[in-house]
Amino acid sequence: MDIFFDYFWAFVLGGGLCVIAQILIDKTKLTPAKILVGYVCIGVVLTSVGAYEPLVKLAGCGATVPLSGFGYAIANGVKTAVEEKGLLGALTGGIGATAGGITASICFGLLASFVFSSKPKR
Amino acid sequence: MNEKEYSKYVEGRAKKSPILKNCAFAFLIGGTICTLGQGFFHLYTFLGMDELDARTLVSVTLIFITTLLTGFGVFDNIARFAGAGTLVPITGFANAVASEAIDSKSEGFIPGVGAKIFTIAGPVILYGTFFGAIYGVIYYFITLIWG
Amino acid sequence: MKKSILKFKRKPKICASYSVVGHMEADGPLGKQFDEYCLDDKFGKESWEKAESEMQRRALCGAIKKSGLIDTELDVLLAGDLLNQCIGSNYALSNFDTGFLGLYGACSTCSEGLLIGASLFSGGIIDTCATVTSSHYCASERQFRFPLEYGGQRTPTAQWTTTGAGAFILSDNGDVEICEGLVGKVIDKGISDINNMGAAMAPAAINTLKRYFLESEHSPEDFDLIITGDLGYEGSEILKELLLDEGIDIRKNHVDCGLMIFDRDRQDVHAGGSGCGCSAVVMSASIIPNLASGVLKNVLFLGTGALMSPMSLSQGGTIPSVAHLLHISHAGGK
């Protein structure tokens, strides 16, 4: 049953975060790029005040897969790094914690550009 | 009609995006992507990974799938319905990177792909890292004072 | 009042026209009437920008061939497209042995070219000329919006850039003549939404039509059709509504090339087609042949252009617009 609730909350919170962005897109003049940046920044801020951790505990990937989870990873990485290395950790922790995602997407992107070409649209 | 009146008139008459339908699709598809991520997460932890690594690998997996779908020209067709449902999860980030990379090939691999790959990814990384660094500095001094 | 309608004393004839389109347009309601189409939109080239040039080259060659002239007989080439600095036309026409004037009027370029060609002809300065304009969905999407494979949603008022090139040859024989012209003024009503270009362009069309009917002896009923370039659904409705407020009723005979070229119910193009190629291919494939055969006797053609640049858009600037008018008639049997 626990497993069921894991998936249930992942679906609901993940979907809910998307709905908030959808309303912002449709109702305001915010562009998708601004929304992505906003989500990451809000993720950092919420994590730093301790408000995001409970969401991750509850919904798992429902909180970490949306881009606010990217901010969560940055803030957590920074926190751990500061505890280990002091002030220098403020500079190394953020990118370090998200290195996997960033490196994967730019490397896959580059590989994709070797293989694929854009197609005519309809 | 002056500019203000005209803008008001235009905005008043323009057909609005079907927000209920858009939100429904965003919820369903966004929720599905996160649930899929949760599935991978369970799989990876079941295989013995620790939680932090499993989360990173979930992101990598979703990024890989998105890049493939983008390359085959399928992703934009899904996003047409999904809207924020594919934008907000890590899939939106990966699609922005991959679509820029594929599209800028005609401008060469260094100035084209190399620079354009960060058109949308760049701001996300920049501001995320920036706020993270600020948080780090604040956190450092807080622990110093209250240690 | 100062007269601004250009009444052509020596009326140029449109002796040939030729259209080349992409797969969406070939699949649309006018599909069978276009002279040439390409299913992958690449026209055998490696980039979308080169494909646009190739399309324009083919359109011009086709029109010249239809007219029975050879390219050295042409006095001047007038051409333009949607790419930065008209590079599409510059490449397309680089191997023609004729003088070239590059034009930029965004989606109004087709009417701008015909207007300039007709003026030069009427003044007796030239005897033949060719005008050609083009736009390519993939090339302009990259320039003005997002990469092609980027996943995003469009609003209902967004328009779809036409992939197509249309060419016209002006000379002194043929059954379609250009009688009058009116150069549009740049109108900026403060619209900055690239996904509602119809609303940005409608005020320019309103301004030009109002000036025309104020000065001319003609009224809207004298025309079989009043054709706008690419206002799309939204812009067309605004045009008809606001002109009616001014006492000019064009509801019966107004058509829009952006609405004619695609089937909005079947094709996912939102408010309709746009782009330099839109009015060029619709005029070339549908309107001009009907004028030549006499099915249509008198039409007004307004090319409407949204004059933004990628830079102005990224700075959040407004979209100035312009609409050039041409009065085109059936000339047979006179």
Image: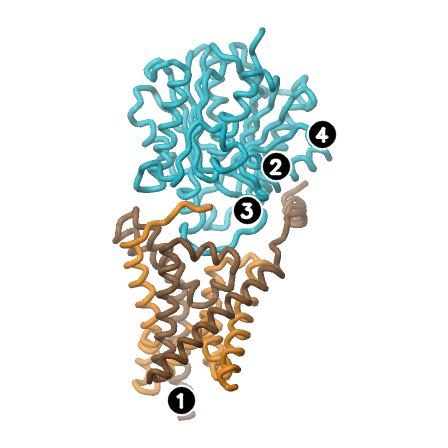
Chain colours: A orange, B brown, C cyan
* Left or right of C316 in this view: C214: right
Q: Does any portion of residue B142 appear in the rendered image?
A: yes
Q: Does any portion of residue B134 appear in the rendered image?
A: no
Marks 1 and 2, Cα distance to the nearest angstrom? 62 Å
Q: Mark 3 points at which residue?
A: C158
Same chain under badges 4 and 1? The reply is: no
Could you classify mark 2 by the number of other residues whose Cα lies within 10 Å: few (under 14), some (14-19), or many (20 or more)? Answer: many
Q: Residue B143 carries which label?
A: 1
Q: Choose mark 3 or mark 1, whichever is in front.
A: 3
Q: Mark 2 points at which residue?
A: C203
Amino acid of disc 2: Pro
Report the quarter where the C terminus of chain B lies: bottom left
Q: Residue C249 carries which label?
A: 4
Same chain under badges 1 and 2? The reply is: no
**Circle 4 — which element?**
loop
Q: Where is residue B141 in the image (x, y as percent from the top left)?
A: 39, 85
Whether the residues at callouts 3 and 1 have beta carbons within 8 Å, the answer is: no
